[in-house]
Image: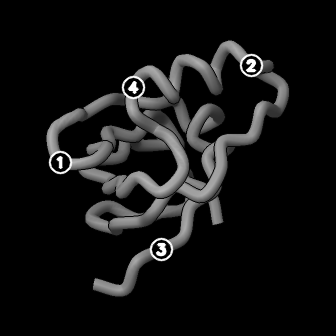
Amino acid sequence: MTLSELNVGDVAIVEQVNVGQHGGELANRLAALGVVSSKPIQVLRRARLGGALHIRVGLTTEIALRSREADTVKVRLLNC
């Protein structure tokens, strides 16, 4: 499952960030923002028509990602 497939309110654990078509630069940027393996992540809001996602990484960091960037983040959904 990818980050872009999560619903608003879902909490998941990051399993892997795939390099994909964006190359290593996106993976490095996400790592700098805290999107790394074993880190909890939650979808706070989702833009209409497949737009950006507003997510919380860990407990304090909130970022927005394009849906195509979120497609590169593999996650495991937590049962809360």
Q: Position of residue 2 (x, y in %)?
A: 62, 57
Q: Amino acid at mark 1?
A: Leu
- Classify mark 2: helix, strand or loop: helix
- Classify mark 4: helix, strand or loop: loop
Q: Residue under circle 1?
A: 59
Left or right: where 27 falls relative to 13: right
Instruction: Single out the residue that lies furthest toward the top.
Output: 25
The answer to whether mark 3 and mark 1 are in CB contact below 8 A is: no
Q: Earlier in the sequence, mark 2 or mark 1?
A: 2
Where residue 33 is drawn, which disc sits there? Answer: 4
Q: Is residue 23 above or below residue 3?
A: above
Quadrant in which the N terminus appears? bottom right
Q: Earlier in the sequence, mark 1 or mark 4?
A: 4
Quadrant in which the C terminus appears? bottom left
Of the residues tagged 2 and 3, which is closer to the observer?
2
Q: Residues within 10 Å of mark 1 (few under 14, many from 20)?
A: few
* Real-space Cα separation, disc 2 to disc 3, in angstroms: 25 Å
* Real-space Cα separation, disc 4 to disc 3, in angstroms: 20 Å
Q: Earlier in the sequence, mark 2 or mark 4?
A: 2
Q: Is residue 41 above or below residue 18?
A: below
- Classify mark 3: helix, strand or loop: strand
Q: Residue under circle 2?
A: 24
Q: Position of residue 11 (x, y in %)?
A: 34, 66
Q: Residue under circle 3?
A: 77
Q: Position of residue 19 (x, y in %)?
A: 77, 31
Q: Which residue is pictured at 45% across the width and 62% down the height? A: 13
Number of marks: 4
The answer to whether mark 4 and mark 3 are in CB contact below 8 A is: no
* Residue 55 figure quarter: top left
Q: Is residue 5 above or below residue 33?
A: below
Q: Residues within 10 Å of mark 2 (few under 14, many from 20)?
A: few
